C-alpha cells in the first residue's frame, strides 16, 4: 500500500480476470483492522455472504439479491449482543441505517469480516457498495462506481470471495472466466 498523502486519498483496484475497476477504501487505507471506527479497510480473504438492494432504485440485480426496507439497519455498537449483525430499526443500540438517501447503499455486498468468530469492538459493517463522487474514502468499506458494481455483481459466483490487499483468491469453480478477484492498492 502506498503511504496516505494529504493530496492523495486511499484508492484501490478490483481486478476480475483481465478487467480492473477503480475503488475507494477506508480513509486510513488497507491494513489490519483493530477496532470499530478506525477507518481501515481490513486486509484478508473474505466471502460476500449476501447482497441487498434498494428496490425503488436498483432494478437490475442478482437473483440472490434481497430487497432493503426502511427498517433495515446494521448494529455497530459493541455493547449490543447484535453487534455486526443486521437489525430492525429503531434499535436500542447504535446502528447504521441501510436505507440511505445518498444512494451509497442502493446495492450492497455484505463482506464476512469479523463474523465467525465475532469479536466485539473489532469492526463491523464492511460492505462492497457504491462510491461517492470522486471516490472519496470510506469508513472501511470497498466502494465502486455504480456501473462497475453492476458489472461485478453478475461476474461473481454464487459464493463469491474477494481478497483485500495483495492476495489473490479463487472464486466459485462453477464460474468460467475470470478466476481471480483482487482489491489491490494503486
Image (cartoon, helix red, strand yellow):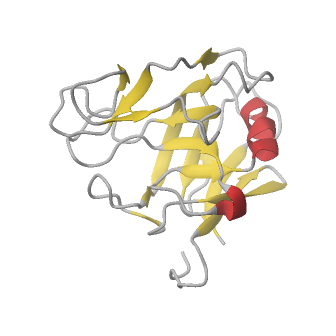
Lateral position of residue 61 relative to residue 98, left or right: right
**Observer-nearest residue: 34 or 136?**
136
Q: Which of the 4 quarters of the picture holds residue 107?
A: top right
Total numbered badges shown on the rendered structure: 0
**Observer-nearest residue: 161 or 125?**
125
- Picture coordinates of residue 8 (x, y %)? 61, 80
> Residue at the location (53% across, 17% down)?
69
- Picture coordinates of residue 100 (x, y %)? 55, 35
- Picture coordinates of residue 51 (x, y %)? 59, 26
Lateral position of residue 180 relative to residue 120, left or right: right
Q: Quadrant of the N terminus?
A: bottom right
Q: Quadrant of the C terminus?
A: bottom right
**Observer-nearest residue: 125 or 95?**
95
- Picture coordinates of residue 75 (x, y %)? 32, 32
> Residue at the location (72% across, 14% down)?
63
Q: Is residue 151 above or below residue 21?
A: above
Q: Is residue 106 above or below residue 145?
A: above
Amino acid at each position: 500500500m502506498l503511504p496516505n498523502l494529504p493530496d492523495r486519498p486511499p484508492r484501490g483496484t478490483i481486478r476480475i480476470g483481465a478487467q480492473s475497476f477503480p475503488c475507494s477504501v477506508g480513509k486510513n487505507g488497507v491494513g489490519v483492522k483493530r477496532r470499530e471506527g478506525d477507518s481501515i479497510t481490513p486486509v484478508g480473504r473474505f466471502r460476500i455472504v449476501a447482497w441487498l438492494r434498494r428496490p425503488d432504485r436498483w432494478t437490475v440485480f442478482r437473483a440472490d439479491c434481497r430487497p432493503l426496507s426502511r427498517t433495515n439497519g446494521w448494529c455497530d455498537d459493541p455493547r449490543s449482543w447484535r453487534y455486526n449483525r443486521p437489525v430492525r430499526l429503531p434499535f436500542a443500540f447504535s446502528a447504521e441505517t441501510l436505507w440511505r438517501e445518498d444512494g451509497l447503499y442502493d446495492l450492497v455486498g455484505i463482506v464476512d469480516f469479523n463474523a465467525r468468530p465475532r469479536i466485539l469492538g473489532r469492526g463491523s459493517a464492511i460492505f462492497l457498495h457504491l462510491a461517492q463522487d470522486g471516490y472519496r474514502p470510506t469508513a472501511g468499506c470497498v466502494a465502486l462506481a455504480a456501473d462497475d458494481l453492476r458489472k461485478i455483481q453478475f461476474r461473481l459466483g454464487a459464493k463469491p470471495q474477494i481478497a483485500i490487499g495483495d492476495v489473490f483468491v479463487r472464486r466459485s469453480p462453477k464460474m468460467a472466466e475470470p478466476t481471480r478477484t483482487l482489491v489491490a492498492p494503486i
